[in-house]
Image (cartoon, helix red, strand yellow):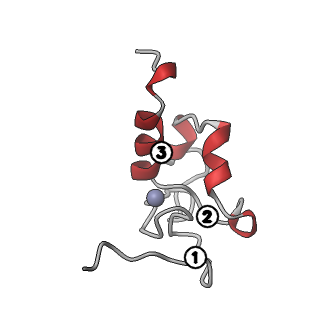
Amino acid sequence: MEAGRIVTGETIHPSNCPICGLDNDCGNLSGKPRGTCWCSRESFPDEIFDLVPSHQMNQSCICRDCLSAFKNGRQDEKAE
Ligand SMILES: [Zn+2]
């Protein structure tokens, strides 16, 4: 069974999420002025970067799906 494509770190592409390997939809990379991307308005818990391979750190953005999945996984800090 194929359950999505897993990128194993061989290819670093700045438009792909380092966690799931899918398009991260980052506006900073699509030519928009810096700071207009959705990720500039989101808060990324420090712990999520533990999921990012060190060689991909600061190379590619984490996608929304992984961010929300991560946040849903730790509901203890839900502030709403
Ligand atoms: Zn992702």
Q: Amino acid at mark 1?
A: His
> Which of disc 3 and disc 1 is earlier in sequence?
1
Labelled pair 1, 3 in contact (Cβ < 8 Å): no
Indicate yes or no: mark 3 CB to ligand 1 under 8 Å: yes
Q: Residues within 10 Å of mark 2 (few under 14, many from 20)?
A: many
Which residue corresponds to mark 1? Answer: 13
Mark sitting earlier along the chain (1/2): 1
Image quadrant holding the C terminus, namely top left
Is mark 1 in CB contact (under 8 Å) with mark 2?
Answer: yes
Q: Which amino acid type corresponds to the residue marked 2 in the rendered image?
A: Ser
Between the C-alphas of marks 1 and 3, the distance is 18 Å
SS state under label 3: helix
For image coordinates 39% across by 51% down, the residue present is 65
Residue 79 sits above or below residue 58 on the image: above
Disc 1 secondary structure class: loop
The percent coordinates of residue 19 (x first, y second) are: 53, 61
Identity of the residue furthest to the bottom in this view:
10
Q: Residue 76, relative to residue 61: is it above or below?
A: above
Q: Residue 51, position in %: x, y?
A: 61, 54
Residue 32, percent across and down?
52, 57
Specify whether 51 is left or right of 73.
right
Query: Looking at the image, which residue sits at the far right?
Result: 54
Labels 2 and 3 touching (C-beta < 8 A): no
3 is higher (above) or lower (below) than 41: below
| Residue depicted at 25% across the width and 80% down the height | 1
Q: Which residue is mark 2?
A: 60
Q: Assign a secondary structure to mark 2.
A: loop
Could you say which disc has been placed on residue 67 in the image? 3
- Quick one: label 2 or label 3, which is nearer the N terminus? 2
